[in-house]
Amino acid sequence: MKKTFLSDKTPIYCLIPSEAFILDDHIKGYLDHGISVKENDVIVDVGANIGVLGIRLSKSFKSISIYSFEPIPEIFNVLKKNSQFSRNINFKVYQKGIGKKLENKVFTYFPNSPALSTAEPEMWEKNPQAFRNAVKGSLQNAPKKFWWAKLIPSFFIPFIAKKLLKNSQKISCKIITLSHFIKEENIEKINLLKIDCEGLEWNVLMGIKKSDWAKIESIVMEIHDIKNRLKDTVKLLKKHGFRNIKTEKEKALNETKLINLYATR
């Protein structure tokens, strides 16, 4: 575990400093497209990673509740450290994943690139070119601090991609449903549900009971648009009362099937 500083000198603990900067850059657009957060709101962060969103919101608001989920032990330890470091007593963390049923699920952890850890590594294995495109896009659109990334020759991309996926580990993690958590913690309202769980986003939605959908005011999620997942997600959200739905493709992910979705009532 290391300590670094984000672009505005906000201190944060991380596993890999460069990844912390990229994660921070990734969440900057979350509060756009009609999504807003205010004092006393309740945030559920599915796929919290090291807790950049929690750190940012805890710094911006004096009174906000954040429930963050991260199943990978090594990443969770950093998330826990950041929640304590934030001094927000309502920044709570759970070493669990959120899915469609209560179970134990095997995740693939990538030590060289923790943020890529997933229970569906085959999405990259089946299409290695897509992963290389993602790496290429990330380098070409890296935060200003990493200006040198744009100078890396294209022929190096496959080697970088291979290194990021090297030495992967299989880890069994506990999965619960969002509705199980809502009942367990007696949560009456979720002002913002953020989902970024590397391919398992549909499972998260399938684990929400009909009676709990009305408790969710807004959603920000990353979608892996395979097998009509984006279309199905939009249909599902409209069914449950979300009328304002927008999508956006980050420049860094332009050549991938990754899409950000923003939904409000």
Image (cartoon, rainbow, N blue to C red):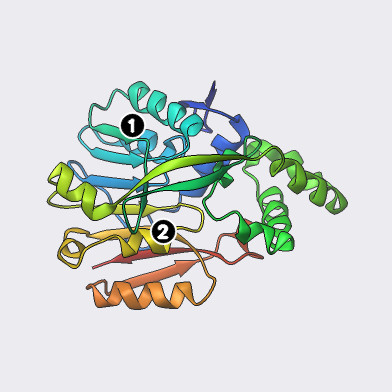
Q: Residue at x 52, y 31 (%)?
A: 6
Number of the label disc, if any, that sits on residue 82: none
Secondary structure at badge 2 equals strand
Query: Mark 2 sits on what residue?
Result: 221
Q: Is residue 119 above or below residue 259?
A: above
Q: Residue at x 12, y 51 (%)?
A: 188
On the image, the x and y values in percent for residue 54 come to: 36, 37
Describe residue 153's horizontal placement relative to residue 39 as left or right: right
Which quadrant is home to the N terminus? top right
On the image, the x and y values in percent for residue 189 come to: 16, 52
In which quadrant of the rendered view does residue 236 lie?
Answer: bottom left
Secondary structure at badge 1 equals helix
Q: Check disc 2 and give the amino acid type.
A: Met
In which quadrant of the rendered view does residue 42 lie?
Answer: top left
Q: CA distance from mark 2 to mark 1?
A: 22 Å
Query: Mark 1 sits on what residue?
Result: 59
